Image: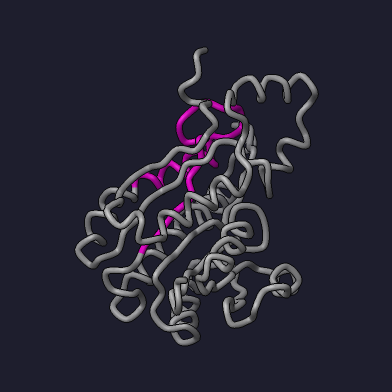
């Protein structure tokens, strides 16, 4: 059991964030579940023991408010032992539709919010010393060509660029920082994307993932491992989970 080990999970109302929060609660962690919809979070987590989760709703795309969010979490649950930033948007934007607002919409939640959360929760008194693990979620879109994914992919690539310098600094505080890079996930926004594919596109997608596309539980299980003491020597790593997509024989 992970008694009194609090983990913050953003984007907890759907997809990877939701599944991660469920697995962590069932494993014995206490979880701060965050998204913009309190009603949805109440509905999703009402079956769990209320001692093992706390709902704190927040719009993390409002970057100026993230310090306030971190302060409220700290006041409500004290120092955290884990942070998992799953909140994000997956925009498909052909080049001719890109503008400054859409770029900022992607970067604010996908990139800048994650960086600010890491910064705020790595301050003294906000994390459990020598027992903390922070995890950011990237995407294969930062590693391969895909039509309409230039803004989304660049927002995730910037997050990966943050990893090594930040992990180097944080490890001297006893905080581990890693990035998970999923391929297509059949949940949340990924499920919406798959549902819009034609039969031919679905067949092509299936061929390009020899071990199958990801389910949300595949990513959540890796998150739970990286949060646990079983991974206490792992930091600064980019971990790809993609069903063999990137190493397949073309």
In the image, is residue 176 part of the stretch drawn in magenta?
no
Question: What sort of colour scheme is used for the picture?
Answer: one colour
Does residue 84 lie above or below 196 as drawn? below
Magenta part of the chain: 133-161
Q: How many marks?
A: 0
Residue nearest the viewer, comparing 218 with 35: 218
Does residue 97 lie above or below 47 as drawn? above
In the image, is residue 135 part of the stretch drawn in magenta?
yes
Q: Residue placed at 27% from the left, 53% from the top?
A: 233
**Within the image, what quadrant is residue 184 found in?**
top right
Residue nearest the viewer, comparing 238 with 227: 227
Q: Residue placed at 54% from the left, 72% from the top?
A: 31
Query: Horizontally, is 197 left or right of 16 in the view?
Result: right
Q: Is residue 102 visible?
A: yes
Q: Give percent across and percent down for residue 56.
A: 59, 77
Does residue 28 lie above or below 204 as drawn? below
Q: Residue placed at 63% from the left, 43% from the top?
A: 215
**Within the image, what quadrant is residue 200 found in?**
top right
Q: Give percent across and percent down for residue 185.
A: 62, 41
Q: Residue placed at 49% from the left, 69% from the top?
A: 8
Does residue 36 lie above or below 149 as drawn? below
Q: Give percent across and percent down for residue 236.
A: 30, 49
Q: Residue furthest top?
A: 250
Q: Residue furthest bottom?
A: 75
Q: Give percent across and percent down for residue 61.
A: 56, 63
Q: Residue furthest front?
A: 1
Residue nearest the viewer, comparing 148 with 119: 119
Query: Horizontally, is 131 left or right of 169 in the view?
Result: right
Q: Is residue 67 visible?
A: no
């Amino acid at each position: 059991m992970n008694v009194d080990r609090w983990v913050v999970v953003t984007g907890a109302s759907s997809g990877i964030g939701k599944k991660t929060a469920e697995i962590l609660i069932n494993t014995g962690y206490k979880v701060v579940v965050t998204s913009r919809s309190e009603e949805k979070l109440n509905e999703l987590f009402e079956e769990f023991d209320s001692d093992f989760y706390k709902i704190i709703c927040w719009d993390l795309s409002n970057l100026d408010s993230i310090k306030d969010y971190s302060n409220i979490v700290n006041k409500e649950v004290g120092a955290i032992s884990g942070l998992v930033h799953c909140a994000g948007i997956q925009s498909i934007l052909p080049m001719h539709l890109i503008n400054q607002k859409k770029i900022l919409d992607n970067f604010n939640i996908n990139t800048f919010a994650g960086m600010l959360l890491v910064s705020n929760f790595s301050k003294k008194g906000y994390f459990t010393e020598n027992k903390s693990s922070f995890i950011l979620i990237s995407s294969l879109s930062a590693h391969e060509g895909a039509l309409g994914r230039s803004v989304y992919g660049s927002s995730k690539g910037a997050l990966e660029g943050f990893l090594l310098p930040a992990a180097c600094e944080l490890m001297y505080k006893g905080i581990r920082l890693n990035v998970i890079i999923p391929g297509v996930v059949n949940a949340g926004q990924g499920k919406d994307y798959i549902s819009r594919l034609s039969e031919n596109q679905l067949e092509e997608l299936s061929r390009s993932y020899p071990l199958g596309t990801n389910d949300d539980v595949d990513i959540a299980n890796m998150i739970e491992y990286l949060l646990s003491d079983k991974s206490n020597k792992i930091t600064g790593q980019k971990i790809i989970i993609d069903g063999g997509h990137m190493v397949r024989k073309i």
